[in-house]
């Protein structure tokens, strides 16, 4: 592996982001990592090595702050080869009961922050004529579950953005992957990472049952975050990384079923679909 590469990782103080940063440093990479609190990030990583590790306090809802973090990374390391947009959190509840502000907040972090980081780093990668962007989506952005409508909407947006930005920047030698995991054994379902609105409206049984099932699976998820971090490092060395990468057996099964269902529905309604054009 080319360990001279510089990685820029958002949301690095816990969960998959933290595991990835530790794994990168263990393997000799240079890493700029963001969190709301650089000191907390440094303590979590447990390595103070200014030659290879740059902890950054970044408000991802502030474009100027993102731009400044990119410039700090360039000042220390001289380049940025891989960006991982990992910052984000989950949200469960019925759309009736989730407040408008909470919906806007999760879109700010899960979607707009991802777009803003990409927007800030693209001039650097275009100048280099190389770069790799990994946006962390979710299988929920392709196959949602009851009660996760708002979260799924944010991850569907990340996937669509990734698909099109990949087309836009291909000529500059920049590659893009959207990683779409199922349940991984991180802190995703804990109170620190999940905005949960308990459903009090009568009915919504599918939502309530799904919430109970997901919450009871915390700490028992099948996905191995250490393996996910290793996969990201392998992807960064691939000459042709995938556009979409579903991670986990559950993600594969859910995506496969959705694709089969969509294909069947498309063919079933083909005559109506193509009949919408002018004759």
Image (spheres, helix red, strand yellow):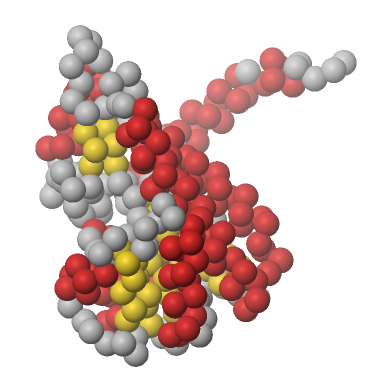
Which residue is located at x 48 percent, y 57 percent? Answer: 63
Task: Indicate left or right for 176 with 92 as reference.
Answer: right
Residue sitting nearer the eye, 134 or 264: 134
In the rendered image, residue 172, in percent from the top left (x then y), is placed at 68, 69
Task: Indicate left or right for 21 with 242 as reference.
Answer: left
In the rendered image, residue 60, in percent from the top left (x then y), is placed at 40, 56
Which residue is located at x 87 percent, y 16 percent? Answer: 279
Q: Which residue of the protein is positioned furthest toward the bottom in this rendering?
A: 51
Residue 114, placed above or below residue 142? below
In the rendered image, residue 256, in percent from the top left (x then y), is placed at 44, 40
Residue sitting nearer the eye, 33 or 69: 69
For the N terminus, which image quadrant? Answer: bottom left
Task: Indicate left or right for 207 with 253 as reference.
Answer: left
In the rendered image, residue 119, in percent from the top left (x then y), is placed at 56, 59
Which residue is located at x 15 percent, y 30 percent? Answer: 212
Residue 89, placed above or below residue 82? above
């Amino acid at each position: 592996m080319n360990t001279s590469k510089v990685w820029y990782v958002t949301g690095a103080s816990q969960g998959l982001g933290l595991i990835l940063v530790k794994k990168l440093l263990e393997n000799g990479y240079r890493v700029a990592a963001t969190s709301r609190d650089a000191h907390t990030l440094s303590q979590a990583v447990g390595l103070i090595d200014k030659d290879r590790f740059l902890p950054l306090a970044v408000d991802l809802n502030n474009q100027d702050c993102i731009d400044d973090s990119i410039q700090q990374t360039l000042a220390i390391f001289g380049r940025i080869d891989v960006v991982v947009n990992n910052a984000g959190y989950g949200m469960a509840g019925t759309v009736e009961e989730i407040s408008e502000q909470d919906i806007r907040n999760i879109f700010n972090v899960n979607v707009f922050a991802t777009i803003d980081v990409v927007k800030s780093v693209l001039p650097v990668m275009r100048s280099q004529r190389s770069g790799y962007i990994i946006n962390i989506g979710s299988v929920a952005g392709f196959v949602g579950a009851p009660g996760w409508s708002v979260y799924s909407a944010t991850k569907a947006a990340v996937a669509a953005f990734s698909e099109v930005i990949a087309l836009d920047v291909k000529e500059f030698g920049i590659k893009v992957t959207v990683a779409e995991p199922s349940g991984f054994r991180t802190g995703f379902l804990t109170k620190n990472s999940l905005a949960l609105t308990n459903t009090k409206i009568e009915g919504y049984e599918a939502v309530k049952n799904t919430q109970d099932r997901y919450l009871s699976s915390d700490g028992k998820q099948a996905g191995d975050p250490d393996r996910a971090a290793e996969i990201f490092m392998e992807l960064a060395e691939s000459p042709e990384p995938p556009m979409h990468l579903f991670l986990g057996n559950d993600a594969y099964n859910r995506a496969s079923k959705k694709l089969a269902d969509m294909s069947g529905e498309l063919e079933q309604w083909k005559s109506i679909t193509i009949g919408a054009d002018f004759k």
